[in-house]
Amino acid sequence: MDHFELKNGVMHAEGVPLPEIAQAVGTPVYVYSSATIARHVEVFREALAQVESGPEGPLIAFAVKANPNKAVLATLAGLGLGADVVSGGELLRARAAGIPADKIVFSGVGKTADEMRLALSEGIFQFNVESEPEAEMLSEVASAMGVEAPIAFRINPNVIAGTHAKISTGGSEDKFGVAYDRALAAYARAAELPGLSIRGVAVHIGSQLTDLAPSRAAFEKIGVLIAELRAAGHAIVTADLGGGLGVPYDPAKPVPPLPAAYGAMVREVTTGWDVRLLFEPGRVIVGNAGVLVTRVIRVKQGVTDPFVIVDAAMNDLMRPSLYDAWHDIRSVTPNGADMTANIVGPICESGDTFAKKRAMDAVEPGDLVSFMTAGAYGATMGNTYNSRALTPEVLVRGDDWAVVRERQPIEALIAADQLPPWM
Ligand code: LLP
């Protein structure tokens, strides 16, 4: 469910007509709905209400990579969420947005010693360590600081997630985590190292998961491992089940499992684990809470279908060109007529295509168009290819709206380059 609806024929974000924002801020522009974010947090939390997770209940650590805008993170902080971060930058952003350090989990295969120091000095909840060499580095860094790093090993369960290959992370050939068969040895090694305090296990098998079976298989393996680790003398008090739950993009496709079904599956598999559960949802919290609003520059005739050239491009929303991702494309002011078109941006490569042969609302030059479900992995993956400035972002709350990231002036982009002294 989202709060982007037609009112009197004009698409609104909650109480705000999108043309008002487009007029004031220009296009392209990302628009987020606070009410949709809050709703998804509530739904996710309710879905987990019945899981066994100790006295504190589950820790929901939002995957910051999905949408790191400070205002979005502050909204989530206000709703009590923690953060799953994968870089020092994300850690600093989460802290700046008011997320307490003791609700922050640090994931990722390539944490540097500097990032480890930063996270230790902040006092984060847990490091999800992805290899034995990483555990050794963390041990050295923590020992030198005279502190203990709370750790879980991220386990690679060798389960095929059934999602796009580029966002599948739980197969044995993927770079993530400690191989399931190496897990006992990795924990034994970590137990010998100073400066580490073993506290849990972690798993995350991929993103945009539309079938619960692979997650269930991975979690069942984690359950077996927890028993084995305890038998080997390790105190396991947390289990981080990662993120990955898919969201609906294409209304013609079956709806992915709802959070309630996910929660019921988690409950079935994890009852009796006697741990605090952690979750790292990203897309399911913010995916439907954002749209990318763009304006049609011109319509160009094609051999079969016309090309609708919009002022957003692959640098603003990379998902279609990177993963052939499908985003619903709607007119902000639909007139009831339909067309079949290729929707493309102005960038000079054919990959700058949002959709081919798409049946959609009829649009003309000057019309506003929304790319739906762009709240996750949208602005955050933006770049400046073709010397296009980063896209501004707006947050709506009820009838109010505010720019939460200014459009980057192109002069600032150019001024960031420097000539060498010999020029
Ligand atoms: N935890 C870890 C360790 C992750 O690597 C990720 C996502 C998440 C949690 C959150 O997953 P989510 O709940 O959002 O599925 N750029 C791609 C998605 C990349 C996901 C990377 N990891 C896309 O646009 O589809």
Image (spheres, rainbow, N blue to C red):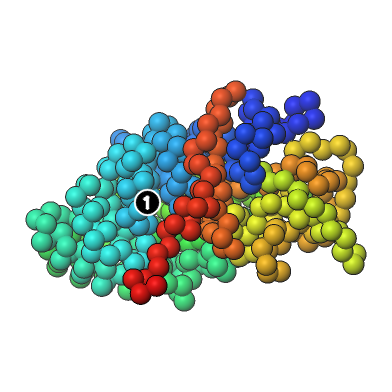
Quadrant holding the N terminus = top right
In the rendered view, tell whether residue 357 sits above or below residue 339. below
251 w.r.t. 417: above or below: above
Relative horizontal placement of residue 347, taking residue 186 as reference (left or right): right
Q: Quadrant of the C terminus?
A: bottom left
In front of the other: 195 or 322:
322
Give the amino acid type for the residue marked by disc 1 in the picture: Glu
Count how many numbered circles sit on residues in the image.
Answer: 1
How far across and how far down the image is residue 328, in percent?
Answer: 72, 49
Q: Is mark 1 on a helix, strand or loop?
A: helix
User: Where residue 160 sits in the image (x, y, percent)?
Assistant: 54, 68
Q: In this view, does 55 lie to the left or right of 259?
A: left
Q: Sort mark 1 into few (<14), some (14-19) or many (20+) by Cα contacts within 10 Å.
A: some
Residue at the spot of label 1: 90
Where 286 falls versus 34 (above or below)?
Answer: below
Residue 394: % across, % down: 55, 37
**Which residue does the image show at 56% across and 60% down from the upper left?**
387
Judged left or right of residue 373, residue 205 is left
